[in-house]
Image (cartoon, rainbow, N blue to C red):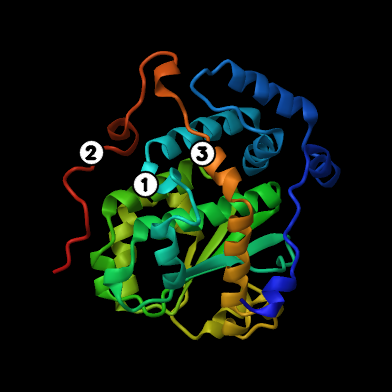
Amino acid sequence: MDTITESRPFAPIPTLDDLMKDNPKLRKEDIDYLQSWMSKQPHLPKIPDELLASFLHTNYYSLERAKNTIENHFTIRTHAPELFTDRDILAPEAQKQLPLVQGAKFRKKDPEGNLVWAIRLMSGDASKVDFDACFKLGLMILDQTIREDPTCSGHILIADAKGTTMAHVAVLKLTTIKRFFKYVQEGLNVRLTAVHVINVSPVVDYVLQMFKPFFNKELMDKIHVHPGPVSELYKVVPQSILPKDYGGDLDDMKEIYDYAVRSLEKHRQWFLDNEFLVDEKKRRGRSKNATEIFGIEGSFKKLEID
């Protein structure tokens, strides 16, 4: 492990008082209202005030919109167990994927206070990549980031498609993709500001066309494809906050990713203890199932490659 990563302290987990000091719109009475509402929904899990703050912030402090996102968030997670259960960073399937993918937030925010992320594949051997495990790993890193900064201005994602091949596309499961984007669009408790796709190729164009049926208009409007050089990023993300890999001044992506993984290791027990799932047996009225939430999925498992 590099010395830069080793020397960086882990971010503290803020209290609700900390968050309210930094966010005048965040009010204790709104948190208490949501806690009271959740206590009357027996199927929902008990969650800490600080996590509730992320739902309020994501929904611009609208109580009704926050309630809807809370319901979607925990219900979708429960019915996508391949992404949200058995979240053990030391499990063999997780350890196998760690060298094959990199994804983490940068150390500095942009001038608007957004956290900026990059994700990229590191293996050209598609047979080694388990995308379910990779998605789970990325969502764990996101959950830990939300714990550390539940009310940041927004999140900008840089999706680096360099090295993506049709062989990678062939092992993607459409069921996983469909469930993932359902979560992103209806249950995510961050403000997703923009997605910038770089190092594009005809393969990437093909993938985006395949994914389009899973995108709503709001998400489509946030996706920006950059066919030119990586320097195009500098128009939307300050070069000074980018990793060295992208011409920036900060740690390279490996250092950033190693730090994120070490944070998951430090908080391993929290992930094992806190899956935050719904109990469908306790839901008032008719319980929900995966077919109702995601639609019929049995007709497709993987992308069909001509």
* Callout 3: SS: loop
Give the quarter of the figure containing the N terminus. bottom right
* Callout 2: SS: loop
Residue underneath mark 3: 275
Q: Position of residue 118 (x, y in %)?
A: 54, 69
**Rendered residue at 44%/53% (across/down):** 136
Which amino acid type corresponds to the residue marked 3 in the rendered image? Glu
**Marks 1 and 2, Cα distance to the nearest angstrom?**
17 Å
Q: Give yes or no for contact between labels 2 and 3 (Cβ–Cβ under 8 Å).
A: no
Which of the two discs, 1 and 3, labels the residue nearer the N terminus? Answer: 1
Which amino acid type corresponds to the residue marked 1 in the rendered image? Glu
Classify 173 as above or below 111.
above
Give the quarter of the figure containing the C terminus. bottom left
**Rendered residue at 78%/41% (across/down):** 15
Classify 239 as above or below 284.
below
Q: Crowding near pointer 3: few (<14 within 10 Å), some, many (20+)?
A: some
Q: Crowding near pointer 2: few (<14 within 10 Å), some, many (20+)?
A: few
Residue farthest to the left?
Answer: 306
Residue underneath mark 2: 296
- Judge depth for marks 1 and 2 and give the one in front: 1
Q: Nearer the viewer, residue 103 or 160?
A: 103
- Judge depth for marks 2 and 3 and give the one in front: 3
For the image, the number of numbered tags is 3
Residue underneath mark 1: 82
Classify 88 as above or below 69.
below
Which of the two discs, 2 and 3, labels the residue nearer the N terminus? Answer: 3
* Callout 1: SS: helix
Q: Nearer the viewer, residue 21 or 16?
A: 16
Q: Is residue 249 left or right of residue 158?
A: right
